[in-house]
Amino acid sequence: MSRTGLCARRLAQTPYCNKINKLHPRHLQPRGFRSTACWAEKNTTHSQRTTPAQVKSAPGNAFSDIAFAFDIDGVLYRGSQGIPGAREMLRSIRAKNIRYVFLTNGGGAHEDAKVASLTKRLGLSPDEDVIRDRVILSHTPMRGWADEVKKQTVLITGSHPETARQIANEYGFSRAVTPADLIHDNDELYPFDNLKDTLHSELRPLPDGKSASAITDPYSTEIAPDALRIDRILVWNDPRDWSLDIQVIHDLLVSHKGYLGTISPKNGNSSLSNNGWQQDGQPELWISNLDLVWKTEYPVNRFGTGAFLEALKGVWSAVTHGAELQYNALGKPSQFTYDYAHTRLLRHYSSIGSTAKDSAKADATTLRRVYMIGDNPESDIRGANEFCPEDGTEWVSILVKTGVWQETAAEREPRYKPAVIVDDVVDAIVWALQNEGVDASRSWLLKG
Ligand SMILES: [Mg+2]
């Protein structure tokens, strides 16, 4: 393939990105179907490779300007089973003082719970400093939202809405409401009660004495002072009760300024943008990630938060006669999430081996290249390919075969093409280190 042809293809994949101008010359090579060994052998530009012994004896940190971002599901484990070699690989790069984070679209739990879960699944000791302070969940970037946003009244839903609310409270959201609060406050809001005593059994009073029963005339311009107004909708992770959640989200998106039980007079007005839908101060809708599917031990991929969004879009299109659903997304491939991860990596280097408190104080240390290792072309690979951090750091995507993406007769190539496809996460690190000019191998890496 000619360089011109390749550039055109890459630019078509990354329409918002001028990254092609910053790429290392090696990345003007055809992407996606090289063997690990072949790629490193033929394309290294280092005049002399660094041997493993040289790396070990090098003064300071030989890898101070590279880093890794690992997806978790399908990369480090699948279902309850750790990927062979993943534990030893992590210990090895930790010992080499290489920066890394775990960037997952998973969520619905606190970051510390994910650290404990990952530690256990990989068979690491709880006191090993390999995972701690490095996990970024789909909703973690909300930690950094402005205080005025955290003071708003937000509707939170997800797999376990009460757990999501507790995490949101810990992030600083002080007025978080769940669907359970609403259906217990107003029996008529949802005409089915089969999950009321199970999934929706935990509830709290609505904030500031507000009520979900205050509106009786949906078109009245007189809004009762105790009427509940929602400022923002946060889909924390994949909901379990799609029926209730779609109903409540719909109700808020057709409302007048987010007052539950109202209907905006602007809906369907063809003289307005988007035919008047979501043009009347309705709450912003935020989806924590767009993953349509994820990988478990079951042979067929399972639906994720993105599947819920597609269902919501379908209902919204039917209700509005084809209006676009306006929403914002976190998680991969959102550039907001990659930017958050990049900042964490920049600040993490000088904190290695120290406490989280020290980490917050650490000065940012520059990066030259970050390798994103994932199993999902639509999120992991796409996000890394399209991310162009302001400091010019190059993000390089590596796709592993242990998760969502599998080569089939119908899909020989992933839609979003990585720099390379490798068998597993160990090979991914070996390839990356070879790409940095190190004469790395699996056995060398796994020895620590
Ligand atoms: Mg994954």
Image (tube, rainbow, N blue to C red):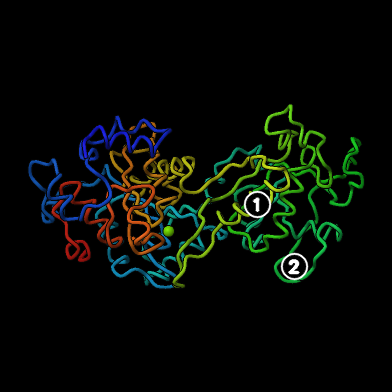
Tell me if residue 78 comes above or below residue 54 in the rendering: below
> What amino acid is labelled 1 in the image?
Leu
| SS category of the residue bearing label 2 | loop
| Residue tagged 1 | 312
Residue 208, disc: none
Looking at the image, residue 199 sits to the left or right of residue 371; the answer is right
Q: Where is residue 35 in the image (x, y as percent from the top left)?
A: 20, 55
Residue positioned 55% across, 54% down in the render: 306
Looking at the image, residue 333 sits to the left or right of residue 155; the answer is left
Q: Mark 2 vs mark 1: which is more N-terminal?
A: 2
Q: In front here: 63 or 289?
A: 289
Q: How many marks?
A: 2
Residue positioned 32% across, 56% down in the render: 412
Q: Where is residue 359 in the image (x, y as percent from the top left)?
A: 41, 46
Q: Can you say which quadrant of the picture contains the C terminus?
A: bottom left
Q: Where is residue 166 in the image (x, y as percent from the top left)?
A: 64, 57
User: Within 10 Å of the Cα at label 1, are there few (<14), some (14-19), or many (20+) other Cα atoms?
Assistant: many
| Residue tagged 2 | 201
Q: In front here: 265 or 75?
A: 265
Quadrant field for ligand 1: bottom left
Q: Ligand 1: does it lie within 8 Å of the C-beta at label 2?
A: no
| SS category of the residue bearing label 1 | helix
Q: Position of residue 184 (x, y in %)?
A: 82, 61
